Amino acid sequence: METEKYEITFWGLDPQYYTRATIGDIWNLVAEKVYDEIGIIIVGEVYDAYFVDPSNDRLSEQYVFTVKSIRIIHENESEFEYWQAYVEVAKEVKYILGNPRTGLITEKVTLNVFEQI
């Protein structure tokens, strides 16, 4: 099935303070709040990495966290409704994290689900 994938990346967070678990906890807390308010759940997978930029000599300052989400299209919400809910989650998480530099990628993807046998 064709659907959408969303990847939001937060730059400049201190890796000694933030971890995948803390970012995931914050995302989950905000997503639960949005779900309670409007009934759309925004799940995510949290990744951490170093952003490699040859113009910057200090790699340790280029630590990033990325949350990847995929809209499951058989749910009741439209693409527009999901987007509105996603933006609410992303804005609130960004605020809680102290307004770090953020990038968002959206793309159409094909999702194949194989049921457990």
Image: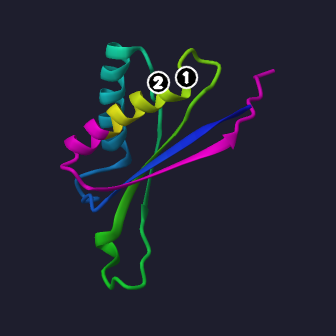
Amino acid type assigned to the residue bearing label 1 in the image: Ser
Q: Is the residue 63 above or below the residue 23 in the image?
A: below
* Gap in angstroms between the C-alphas marked 1 and 2: 5 Å
The image position of residue 71, as x and y in percent, is: 56, 31
Q: Is residue 104 magenta?
A: yes
Q: Residue, x 30% and y 29% (percent of image)?
A: 30
Is 100 situated above or below 84?
below
**Residue at horizontal 44 percent and vertical 19 percent from the top:** 40
Give the quadrant of residue 63: bottom left
Q: Report helix, strand or loop for mark 2.
A: helix
**SS at badge 1:** loop
- Residue 54, compared with residue 33, is above or below; it is below
Rate crowding at label 2 as few (under 14), some (14 to 19) or many (20 or more) other CA atoms within 10 Å.
Answer: few
Q: Is residue 110 left or right of residue 67?
A: right
Q: Quadrant of the N terminus?
A: top right
Q: Residue 109 placed where, x, y %?
A: 67, 43
Judge left or right: residue 17 versus residue 45. Answer: left
Residue tagged 1: 78
Residue corresponding to mark 2: 81
Residue 109 as seen in the image, left or right of residue 76: right
Q: Are marks 1 and 2 in contact (CB under 8 Å)?
A: yes
Q: What's the colour scheme?
A: rainbow
Q: Nearer the viewer, residue 14 or 41?
A: 41
Q: Report x, y in % for residue 105.
A: 49, 51
Residue plotted at (37% across, 38% down): 24
Assess disc 1: are there few (<14), some (14-19) or many (≥20) residues with their C-alpha within 10 Å of its C-alpha. Answer: few
Count every numbered label the image shows and give the total: 2
Q: Which label sits on residue 95?
A: none
**Span highlighted in magenta in the image:** 91-117
Q: Position of residue 23 (x, y in %)?
A: 33, 43
Residue 14 within the segment the image draws in magenta = no
